[in-house]
Image (cartoon, rainbow, N blue to C red):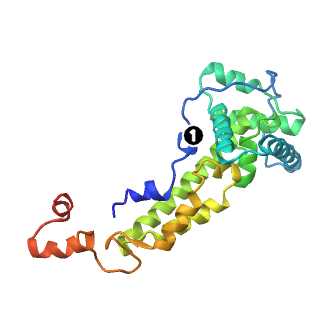
Amino acid sequence: WSMMHINTAGIRSGALSGAEGNKTSSDKAPATQAPAAAGAVADEVVISTLAGRLSAAEKATSATIRGYDHATLGAWVNDNTTDILYPLDAEHKAAAAKQVPQPNDAAAAKSAAAATAFVDRKGPNPFAGLSREQLSTISNDDSGTFTINERRAAFTQAYDEEQAWRTQVVAQAMQEYNTTGKMTNFFKSVLGHFNTLPQLEQSQYPADYASDLEGKIKLDFNYFNHAAGDGGPTPGSLADLLKKQDKKGLDVFDLLIR
């Protein structure tokens, strides 16, 4: 019945939980300084170019991961995450800032410069407002279409959105649990959310993640009664113990440690 089930059965922490960790990376892009153009990807001309860059990155990734099983794909995404989360010391930041997108046209250079400004905490995230699929395409692009700082900015945006969703759904789960003793609607929300995630993000979860949630939803377990569905309190369940509280004058803590 413990609310610890929220973390162990409901939401996997995943690779996103280390979004600002100190990890090592190997710089793959050419060490040529991009033009320090100002602005973000919100400009109409940049959006047009961004669509082409997304298409190129998606094609390159699709060719790379063709034939990968779930475990291999997950490992590949983990390697990308390690590259993205390079240590934010002066040496690594300088190397990352020198990377340029391919091809390095004016719009792509402006996007790369905006991403570097974001990493330096001197500007907003240039990829705010993109879909999770688009963010995943950028962050997992290792073809050189997007720079490491663009990939980091896209990864951070997806991470922030995921954390915001998790905060909301856990609050709803607490309310459901405290009201009904169940977490069935919580599991439904988690499954629905999982099914909307890009394939590359889904690879960071266990292969049976969706089927496990489906089983929990079908069980419709009541953690108060310690019984499936609407079954009554079972001996030793929280609901059963709370009934005995009035008779013995014990508080909940005493009941749970007996």
**Quadrant of res 181:** bottom left
User: Who is closer to the viewer here, 1 or 71?
Assistant: 71
Label 1 residue SS: loop
Q: Is residue 80 left or right of residue 185?
A: right
Q: Residue at x 69, y 21 (%)?
A: 94
From the viewer's perspective, is residue 27 above or below residue 142?
Answer: above
Q: Is residue 54 left or right of residue 23?
A: right
Q: Is residue 8 visible?
A: yes
From the viewer's perspective, is residue 129 above or below residue 221?
Answer: above
Image coords of residue 75 (percent x, y): 64, 39
For badge 1, the amino acid type reads Ala
Q: Quadrant of the C terminus?
A: bottom left
Q: Is residue 51 left or right of residue 20?
A: right
From the viewer's perspective, is residue 187 above or below residue 48?
Answer: below
Image coords of residue 79 (percent x, y): 66, 34
From the viewer's perspective, is residue 217 above or below residue 88?
Answer: below
Q: Which residue is mark 1?
A: 19
Q: Is residue 189 left or right of residue 67?
A: left
In this view, the residue farthest toward the left is: 248
Q: Residue at x 15, y 72 (%)?
A: 245
